[in-house]
Amino acid sequence: MTHDDTAPHHDHAAHPLEQATRHMEAGELPEARTLLHDQIVRVPWAVSARVLLARVSARQGRHDECLRIWREAAALCPSSPVVQEGLRDAVFRRYYGDETADLSTYEDLDKLIQELESAKIVPDPDMSAVVTDAPAEDDLDVASETLARIYENQNYFDEAAQVYDKLARQHPERREAFEAKAASLRRGDREGPAEPE
């Protein structure tokens, strides 16, 4: 993701993770913490928000909280190298006082998101203890290109096609591209048409 530094930034239109990242880069950790906490309340399975919140907690010296958040992220996405490294560093900082552990490897948000998108999500058998209520019906109808690509990368082609069908209904201006992608996945054409723009 590139930003034109001469263009005005409209925080009210930016995604909460982008806003939080800007606050973190500016050293405005309380503002970042609030945005990330609110995002987790809205989307309880938000691994990226937890990763960033754990980093905010670490920078604020809240090691117990940092470790708790990394553990939550690990419960949601245990095979992510980003989460595994963050959890390891949090344990060292919490129990061994290792202030030299370097978390800057994944400071670039684009690289973090790419890493999380490529991670294979393996359900944790103890996850039922984390989720207390069934999601509202509206929450079950989540569709994004990222979710479709995750399903596709994990060879869940029918699920990916269903997500592209939902996207076609949600975005009429891109309907044809989404429908073509869904159709190619159903035909078994795994390369299919180019990603919808």
Image (tube, rainbow, N blue to C red):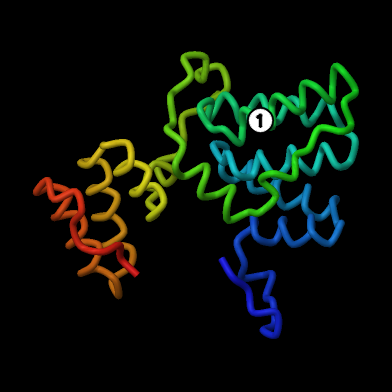
In the picture as drawn, the residue positioned furthest to the top comes out as: 126
State the residue position of label 1.
85
- How many marks the image carries: the answer is 1
Q: Give percent across and percent down for residue 136.
A: 45, 39
24 and 105: which is toward the camera: 105
Residue at the spot x=43%, y=25% of the render? 122
Choose between 102 and 157: the one closer to the eye.
102
- Residue 36 placement (x, y as % from top left): 70, 48
Side (left or right) of 157 relative to 136: left
Residue ID at (52%, 14%): 126
Residue 176 position (above or below residue 120): below
Q: Is residue 191 left or right of residue 42?
A: left
- Residue at 66% across / 54% down in the picture? 108
Q: Residue at x 64, y 41 (%)?
A: 41
The image quadrant that residue 159 belongs to is top left
Q: Quadrant of residue 48?
A: top right
In the image, taking residue 97 as reference, residue 7 lies left or right, namely: left
> On the picture, is 188 further left or further right than 100?
left
Amino acid type of the residue tagged 1 in the rendering = Glu
Crowding at dot 1, Cα within 10 Å, few <14 / some 14-19 / many 20+, comes out as some
Callout 1: SS:
helix
Q: Nearer the viewer, residue 19 or 90?
A: 90
Q: Point out residue 51 in the picture as x, y percentages from the top left corner.
A: 66, 40
Q: Quadrant of the N terminus?
A: bottom right
Query: Image quadrant for the C terminus?
Result: bottom left
What x and y, as percent, mark residue 34? 77, 49
The residue most toward the bottom is 6
